[in-house]
Amino acid sequence: MHPNSNVTIPENILLRKGARKAAEIPEQVCSLLQSGTIESVNLTEWLAVNHLLLFEQITRELDIPVSIQDVTTRLAPKDEQRIMKVIPAIGRQWLEYMERQPAQEKIHLFNFLAKHRSDSVRCWAAYIIGLNPDLHLTEKLEQIRMFAADPHFGVREISWMAVRDSIREDITTALQCLIPWSTDPDPMIRRFAIESIRPRGVWAKHIQPLKENPEMALPLLSAVKSDAHPYVQDSVSNWLNDASKTNPDWVRQVCAVWIEQSGTKDTQRIIKRGQRSI
């Protein structure tokens, strides 16, 4: 159990909307975020967390002989302040430490991180899965699912980034595995199915086969062409927008078919946003 799990958080803290600028985050909120006692509530807070210092605190609380120096040696000096470099580096450090532990201790530690109150800590746990060379892609997807459905936006975003390289390396298997995800009752899972395979994506390497042949992903895309959830709609339209950069005629054709098959406002929104760059 997290040492701060029984701390009573004032209601005004829990119900805050979050500052628009890092300099405007109240000192008490900063302290609670940095100690891993509360979650961030917006992107400004999420980016404000110093993961290296949080890592140092968590390892000290658990009396684990790992320091931030072990992490920073993996990073170029310019990367030490880049959150999308630091999070994977911390995930790898946890993975290497856990590999040296007995099986039961390894499970206990992973569960501690995966269910931690802090969204930042749960992000590390997602990368422990994504970076594990002993896991097949199907196993990684199975284990990353809980993070894809996480209530926190940051953890959900990190979940697909953590397995993106594995998906790129075996896109055919990934597409097959994710077909059921595209019809899952949980919109967060449906969104993961689409976002994780975007041809271009954000903060991620491109998936060349899908840039060249976007039709490979059509079974997944068609399943959500009329999705009622805006979170999923945005992902589908962004996928089409990615594809339009290299295959605009294909995107036009797909949108024409979809609007004939489904004239709902949801489909209309998707195809309008999906063709915004054409």
Image (spheres, helix red, strand yellow):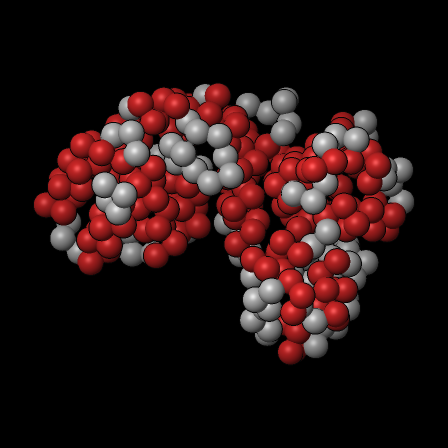
Compared with residue 88, is residue 184 higher up or lower down, i.e. above or below? below
* Residue 26, percent from left and from top: 70, 71
Quadrant housing residue 256: top left
Figure quadrant of the C terminus: top left
Q: Camera-side residue: 1 or 89? A: 89
* Residue 196, percent from left and from top: 44, 37
**Drawn side of residue 95 relative to residue 256, left or right:** right
Q: Camera-side residue: 112 or 59? A: 59
Compared with residue 38, is residue 150 higher up or lower down, i.e. above or below? above
**Drawn side of residue 152 relative to residue 251, left or right:** right
Tell me the residue at 75%/58% (across/down): 34
**Drawn side of residue 38 relative to residue 198, left or right:** right
Figure quadrant of the N terminus: bottom right
Residue 55 is at least partly visible in this image:
yes
Quadrant housing residue 269: bottom left
Specify the farthest residue to the left: 260
Q: Camera-side residue: 6 or 88? A: 88
Q: How many marks?
A: 0
**Drawn side of residue 191 relative to residue 90, left or right:** left
* Residue 206, percent from left and from top: 44, 29
Tell me the residue at 46%/25% (across/down): 168
Quadrant housing residue 200: top left
Residue 40 is at least partly visible in this image:
no
Tell me the residue at 59%/74% (across/down): 15
Specify the farthest residue to the front: 78
* Residue 125, percent from left and from top: 66, 41
Tell me the residue at 48%/21% (across/down): 169
